[in-house]
Amino acid sequence: MSGQKLLILDPIKRLGVNKLKQKNQKGFTLIELLVVIAIIGLLASVVLLALNSARQKSRDAKRLADIRQIASAAELYFDAVNPNGYPTSVAALTGQGSLATWPTTPTPADGTCTTTQNAYTYSSSGGSTYSVAFCLGAATGGISAGVHTLTQAGIQ
């Protein structure tokens, strides 16, 4: 019997490996924590990339909405204020109630657009025609990226 007691007591004396395998210990190992941190970092980077592309798309969508608002205001001016022509300046367009204020372009400029191209530039030739130059950073709403012009005929 005494030989059996030695076999039972022998594993208790080995403290190194058996102490790590005790089931009553609580917590995570360093490897488990590092794996979780790596997964969270990977997910965060994917979300940030998706968010950045959504921001670019929203800026272009706002630019296109602003241009369509300017076109509507110019046509309202033509119909209600001066049936013989379009506004000759931004002040005439915003002063007649058809456009409350001239829209500001969203920043920063995207794609190949420069800061100057990012602005909405209005010009008119004596009221018979008008044009608004603008730039889209990416294809939006069926319109390709790059510099475009709004005229009374539409967006070119």
Image (cartoon, grey):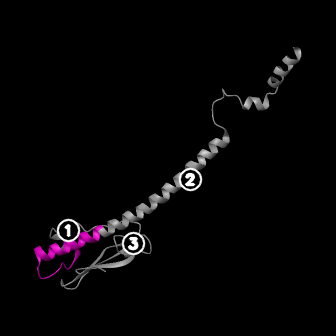
Q: Is residue 37 above or below residue 119?
A: above
Q: Is 126 on the left-hand or right-hand side of 18?
A: left
Q: Nearer the viewer, residue 77 or 15?
A: 15
Query: Which residue appears at 49% of the width and 56% of the height?
Result: 48
Q: Is residue 106 above or below residue 21?
A: below
Q: Position of residue 132 (x, y in %)?
A: 28, 77
Element type where label 3 sits in the image: loop
Q: Position of residue 5 (x, y in %)?
A: 84, 17
Q: Is residue 101 magenta?
A: no
Q: Position of residue 95 (x, y in %)?
A: 17, 70
Q: Nearer the viewer, residue 94 or 34?
A: 34
Distance between the Cα atoms at labels 2 and 1? 46 Å
Position of the N terminus by quadrant: top right
Tell me the residue that label 1 is attached to: 99
Q: Amino acid at mark 3?
A: Ala
Q: Amino acid at mark 1?
A: Leu
Distance between the Cα atoms at labels 1 and 3? 26 Å
Q: Is 89 on the left-hand or right-hand side of 53?
A: left
Query: Which residue appears at 17% of the width and 75% of the height?
Result: 75
Q: Are marks 2 and 1 in contact (CB under 8 Å)?
A: no
Element type where label 1 sits in the image: loop
Residue 54: image quadrant is bottom left
Tell me the residue that label 2 is attached to: 42
Element type where label 2 sits in the image: helix
The part of the chain drawn in magenta is 65-91
1 or 3: tag closer to the N-terminus? 1
Return the mark for residue 139: 3
Residue 125: image quadrant is bottom left
Of marks 1 and 3, the one in the foreground: 3
Q: Amino acid at mark 2?
A: Leu
